[in-house]
Image (cartoon, rainbow, N blue to C red):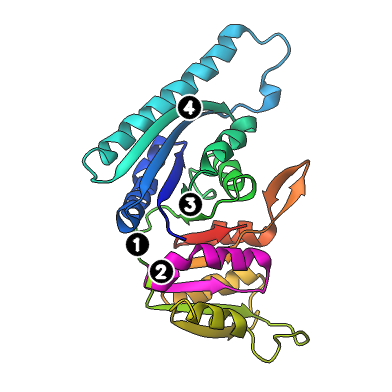
Amino acid sequence: MTFNSLFTVITDEALVDDVLGHALEMARAHDAHLDVLCLGVDRSQTGYYYAGASAVVLQETITRAHDESEAIEKRATKLLDGSGIRWASETGVAQLADLGRHVAARARFSDMVILAQPYGEGRGAELEPVTESALFEAHIPALIVPGGAKPNPAPGRIMIGWNESPEALIAVRAALPMLKQADVAHVVVIDPPTHGPNRSDPGGQLSQYLARHDVRVEIDVLSKTLPRVSDVMMRHAADMDADMVVMGAYGHSRFREAVFGGATRYMLEQAKLPVFMAH
């Protein structure tokens, strides 16, 4: 698999530079086409539209969201023009409760989505459902980029969070184009089970698979010495000076909507480096 078609969603003008910085460098590195959805979001909760709300009030929220999408596209176009890549941009407006449908419908025709970190200071409530819809509804791998992180389309040191799950294996397969270019990929196993088919060689089968794809692999077996697995992973990523983390995205169904499980959410909250996820 190659990354020939990239997609990004930007819902806040303040995030344009960070997100597009990563997306542009990734597009250049893989000679890919980049589609940019500049999405204005009506962030009003459903209950806001009380009985008898006037058409003027409803129109104002739509107009505001439309103006935001136009401002996002204007700023994005300044970066895209003259970038030397193939690109297209689109504006749109969606209500907070319905934006996942619009994102998934477009994201599913791409090889990878580049998105802003959904949690943290100044992050809008829409970023979480945007990320969830790309991963759980469109079933597309996503590169989640934290604010201020330097774009690195060819990470030299990649950390793989490995727990034998289908989600983790899907993420590894999706990340192969970058893993093959990396100097080394560290397969990180935390507290492997004492009973099971791989107890004597944790991470061994994955390492063999990656080696057959010409990926240089090392296995790191760690103990869960901190309260959460994500804490251990983030500390190890800092210790090994990782450029990127690859891991599965985990969630559960709530009223037929996929939502992040605790481990995935904690990881996205803490990450100071790009995280490549797939479900």
Q: Earlier in the sequence, mark 4 or mark 3?
A: 4
Query: Badges 1 and 4: C-beta atoms under 8 Å apart?
Result: no
Looking at the figure, which quarter contains the C terminus? Answer: bottom right
Q: Earlier in the sequence, mark 2 or mark 4?
A: 4
Residue 152 bears which disc, if any? 1
- Above-or-below relation of 19 to 277: above
The residue that label 2 is drawn on is 243
Q: Residue at x 76, y 42 (%)?
A: 256
Alpha carbon separation for disc pair 2 and 1: 8 Å
Alpha carbon separation for disc pair 1 and 4: 29 Å
Q: Secondary structure at mark 1?
A: loop
Which segment is the magenta one? 155-180
Does 89 sit left or right of 175 as displayed? left
- Above-or-below relation of 132 to 247: above
The residue that label 3 is drawn on is 111
Residue 154 visible in this rendered orientation of the protein: yes
- Above-or-below relation of 152 to 77: below
Query: Badges 2 and 1: C-beta atoms under 8 Å apart?
Result: yes
Q: Residue at x 47, y 36 (%)?
A: 11
Of tags 4 and 3, the one toward the viewer is 3
Q: Position of residue 268 (x, y in %)?
A: 55, 57
